[in-house]
Amino acid sequence: MNEYKLCSLLFETTADYDANLETLLTLIDDCDERSLIVAPEVCLTSYDYENMQKMLSFAPKAIEQLKKASHNKIIILTILEERDGKVYNFAKVFHNGAVVYERAKAKLFRFGDEHKYMQEGSVEDFKIVEVDGIKIAVFICFELRFKELWCKSEGADVIAVPSWWGVLRTEHFKIFTQALALTNQCYVVASDSKNEDCTGQSGIINPQGEVQRNGNRPCLCLPYSNKEIRLMRRYMDIGIE
């Protein structure tokens, strides 16, 4: 059986939620079967706080469409949802018609006033989930800055980083994503928005820390190789199982 491909997406989120969903679904459809696809944080709506109820009402429709698109593919992104009267930014992993893992963003970006509109999730919910034989961890944007989460991601084969990362801190995003791959000796698939206030630095980093960024490509796909992970961990043994 062929190995997966890793795909990082890069596109602009507009004020038209339906158009954003159509863009995302088209990019997903263009990816081969057995692709692991990471889209930018809140890529369907952005942080459209002035239309909070509209965002929350759109979530169920988007989730059902993404379930349908996930057959023989793994799709990772974040969506704002309401649970028990509180709003959370949920990372979701879709596969074969289902949401196989989700957790709420545990570290909100206070510079962006996220804490005024959303509730934090629990760090305890951050864990590695195995999907179709691939051990996956998910960092949501600002969470990249927290060492405790780096420790919890140890042993992952692929770390997904859906982000809405500020352009003023572009170098931080590039350094963190590359260092995360080197520290964990795994793949990092980072997806940041193409909107002008974001870095646009979507890309894929391999277990040796070699970086390929999307550039102007809306979708960058590279082969995934578990053998490369094993070789790197055996060659430079730092105790990762």
Image: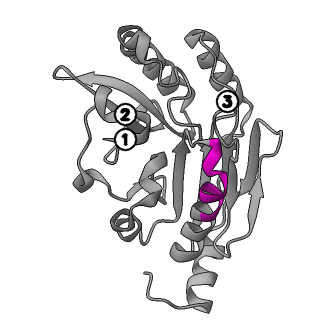
Dot 1 amino acid type: Arg
Q: Is residue 61 above or below residue 110?
A: above
Q: Is residue 124 left or right of residue 97?
A: left
Label 3 belongs to which residue?
Answer: 195
Asked if marks 1 and 3 touch (Cβ < 8 Å), the reply is no
Give how far across and how far down residue 36 sits, in percent.
Answer: 60, 46
Asked if disc 3 and disc 2 are in contact, CB closer than 8 Å, the reply is: no
* Residue under the point 54% across and 42% down: 163
The label shown at residue 10 is: none
Disc 2 on helix, strand or loop? helix
Disc on the earlier residue, 3 or 2: 2
Quadrant placement of the N terminus: bottom right
Q: Tell me which residue sits at (68%, 72%) in the image.
A: 209
Return the residue nearer the eye: 83 or 234: 83
Label 1's element? helix
Q: Which residues are magenta?
A: 167-175
Q: Residues within 10 Å of mark 3 (few under 14, many from 20)?
A: some
Which mark is on residue 110? 1
Identified by mark 2, the residue type is: Glu
- Is residue 35 in sight in this rendering? no
Q: Do callouts 2 and 1 mark residues in contact (Cβ within 8 Å)?
A: yes
- Mark 3 is on which residue type? Asn
Q: Residue 98 lies in what quarter of the image? A: top left
Whether residue 182 is visible: yes
Residue 201 located within the stretch drawn in magenta: no
Answer with left or right where residue 76 lies relative to residue 4. left
User: Could you give the CA–CA distance between mark 1 and mark 3, rounded to whole angstroms?
Assistant: 20 Å
| Vertical arrangement, residue 216 with respect to residue 239, above or below | above
Q: Quadrant of residue 56?
A: top left
Residue closest to the far left: 84
Q: CA distance from mark 3 to mark 2?
A: 18 Å
